[in-house]
Image (cartoon, helix red, strand yellow):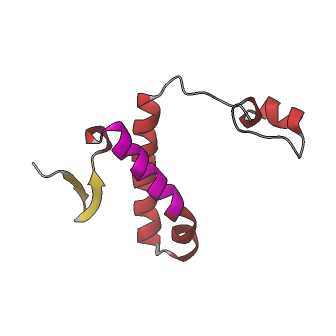
Amino acid sequence: MNEHDTRDDTMTGVDPGRLDDNQLMKELETIHRTRHDTLLYGSNDALRAHNERMAQLEGEWLRRNPRRPVAAGRTREGARERGCGGSATPGA
């Protein structure tokens, strides 16, 4: 079995379920870093592939971290209370 998932002969990367936690985080950091350029300058196929891969990686991270900390400022209620100037980062 090939370690890379292929869809229509397009390589989409290693199945996120096979990545250890550090590898998964590194993949997430990379895909988030490249998101803006892909959105602005990538072809439709590149953007579609980016969307699919990001969803796979984020879905796996959420599956592994169902009780992740949620910053109050990142909720609708917290955003209303914060107005325009508060921090949305946990512990900040």
Q: Nearer the viewer, residue 21 or 54?
A: 21
Q: Is residue 73 above or below residue 49?
A: above
Residue furthest top in the image:
67
* Magenta-drawn segment: 20-33
Q: Residue at 81%, 37% (x, y): give it.
A: 79
Task: Judge whether residue 3 is colored magenta.
Answer: no
| Residue 25, x across and y down, in percent | 43, 45
Residue sitting at 47 percent across and 33 percent down? 62
Residue shown at 41% from the left, 29% from the top: 64
- Look at the picture and state if 19 lies above or below 69: below
Whether residue 87 sits left or right of residue 36 in the image: it is right
Above or below, 28 against 80 in this view is below
Residue 66 pos. (x, y %): 49, 25
Main secondary structure along the magenta-highlighted residues: helix
Q: Is residue 62 above or below residue 10?
A: above
In the displayed orientation, state which residue is furthest to the left: 1
- Which residue is found at the position 64% from the left and 29% from the top? 70
Residue in front for this viewpoint, 7 or 86: 86
Q: Quadrant of the C terminus?
A: top right
Q: Position of residue 14 (x, y in %)?
A: 26, 51
The x and y percentages for residue 46 are 42, 69
Whether residue 12 sits left or right of residue 79 in the image: it is left
Hey, which quadrant is residue 17 in on the image? top left
* Count of picture labels: 0
